[in-house]
Image: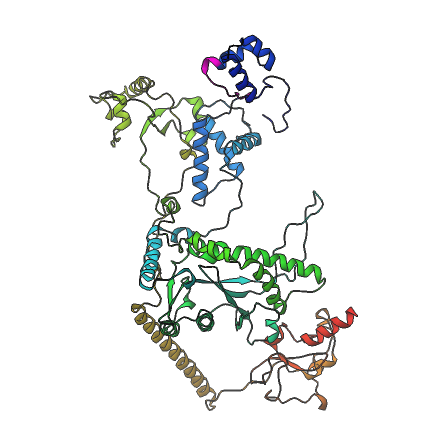
Amino acid sequence: MPRTYVRKTEKAQWTENELEAAITAIQSGRKIREVGRSFNIPESTLRDKLKININTKGKLGRKPVFNDEQETAIASHVIKLANIFFGITPAELRRLAYQFADVNKIKHRFDQEKKMAGQDWLELFLKRHPEISLRKPEGTSQNRISAFNKPEVERFFNNLLAVMEKYKFSESKIYNVDETGISTVQKPAKILAPKGQKQVGSVISWERGKNVTVVCAVSASGQFVSPMFIFPRARMNPQLMRDGPIGAVYRCSKNGWINEELFFDWIKHFHQHVKSSEKDPVLLILDNHGSHISLEIYAYCRSNGIVMVSLPPHTSHRLQPLDLTFFGPLKNALNRECDLYLRNHPHEKITHYELASIFNKAYLRVATMDKGISGFRAAGIWPTDPDKFSEDDFSLTGQPEVPDIQIDINLNETHVSNRDNIMEQSTATVEVEQKNKPQLETSRCSEALHRTPPKKTKWESHQEAEPQPGTSGSNKRQFTSSCSNVLPSLQIPIEKLAPLPGPIGNKGSKSRAKQHSEIFTSTPLKTQLEIKQEKRNLKKKNEESTKSGTRKRKAEKVGKPVTKAKKRPLSKKPGLRNLHFDDSDSESYDESQLCDDDELDDVDPSGDNEECLVCGEFGRDNEIWYRCVMCSNWAHSECSGWESAVNYTCDMCANAEKKKDRK
């Protein structure tokens, strides 16, 4: 039936209610012909309905290509593929339907040239099976697929049950912590634009943004801990905290990522929020990142009643409450707030100085109790449910091979010519299922269905005596015909055309030891942390001795004493304040003017008497400084946020210029 089909007949205009009323009238004693005229239902239809005792309306039009059993098999196979991360697209499903009908000699009207079912069949198939819909999948790495297996998940729940039994934690004492990255470049939302236009753009701040890490934590009762921001810079600027979340903490790192020192600072912040102690401990569930455990963190948590249990590696997409229900809506809300900011502030860019304020608006909207409670419930952590995940959830990592009852049949040449891979073979292996049939006690057909095939041909295993050479073909056809009454339809199942991937096996040893879920605050782990710390100290000592030895050898070669040379500031260019040029004119100006100094611009060459206008600290050796072209004050290159000293303007002067322009 085409998608634009218009009904061309007035047949069967009556409804099921009218049919039911007509049958009731006939049963009460009225004549069938009279009832048919009054309800406008044909007399023959009423007689047929009374004969089979059915008062429902039948379907009109052409019958579907596949029967209910075949379509159910296709639908269940599509769902299986989606559940094990190998879902198929609509075009692949249409092509698979064509192959399934062609291989099994099912009459169809599919496209013979494209070798795929039509769009009409797909839409009606989805309409008949509402449990299947078109979804946009989330990219899942191979590590996550293989790591989420039954032994690792069972180990995590065993650790969780052990600490729950020991400390009797309530929902307000169970917390989850995780990090996420935010950026000054948002993902634009869908907009209304002219139909048919190939490219539609939306404003963003930069080509590429710098990552800022945000550490969030929530309890099983829905209480959130104030977040922690980690900016990719060397020194902290109070302007970065402007209009941020209440109680949030702000730190810096070279690349904007978390490390052991910063996570230790967050642990202190967490302890101030939850007020835990050895008599009133709390449970902290976190992932297996290397920055989350050190000897210093271990000692602090043990002395302050913080029990830490780690998740199995690469399982946060199924076991991390924050990942399940919070971070996704948070980033969507942050993207919309960035869009709104750029609309309200045209021609302005989102920098790290505005990021905390924009994040706070999204955070207040998303950080609700419902998000926290539903995250812990979805992960099976609270209420604790070790059986949260069924065998189907581990289907790819521990999928057993389903034993199939198979026999060999010969396919004629016309059938073979219509295949792709299996179709090119003269013999195909198919599944045979006996449904609603009485068991045959001694017949050869019963043996064919229930006996495991030996190494020799399956036909020979069912013969009382070994057949003579040259007669196997006729015997096989005879055997097939003798079983035709028991096996009315031999079909190649859909699994043979689109097979499920097998279980993931072990690909050999790896250089790194495999990690598991651990109780980080357990006593046996202390010894491992001490050994790790000793190795780290020894490595650091060896590196320092290597560097000192290298300097000594270089000094001996040139005959100079072993002293550490001091470098002069690289970008202290006092004459820069009187120069205004663009990057495009970098070849036109005289570089000698950049270092041309006068008495008004005298600067201590060591930089010790200069104060950074951003961080307020004095200068040190081997630092790069930029001078503002408007106020002539100095700033560290890392504090300025500029990539070069060309036309550097500090934030205060830039904001003052913006206010003047608005006036």
Question: Where, by quadrant of the figure, is residue 194 drawn?
Answer: top right
Identify whether 555 is placed above or below 77: below
**What segment carries the magenta color?**
50-60
**Residue 291: image x %, image y %?**
43, 68
Tell me, yes or no, whether the highlighted magenta stretch contains residue 203: no
Majority secondary structure in the magenta region? loop
Question: Where, by quadrant of the figure, is residue 532 drawn?
Answer: bottom left
Identify whether 374 is placed above or below 10: below
The residue at the point 68 percent across, 60 percent down is 342
304, 239: nearer the viewer: 304
**Residue 313: image x %, image y %?**
39, 58
Count of marks, rendered view: 0
Question: Where, by quadrant of the figure, is residue 302 drawn?
Answer: bottom left
Quadrant placement of the C terminus: bottom right
Q: Residue furthest right?
A: 663
353, 279: nearer the viewer: 279
Q: Is residue 418 visible?
A: no
The residue at the point 33 percent across, 26 percent down is 434
Q: Is residue 489 left or right of residue 33?
A: left
The residue at the point 45 percent across, 89 percent down is 562
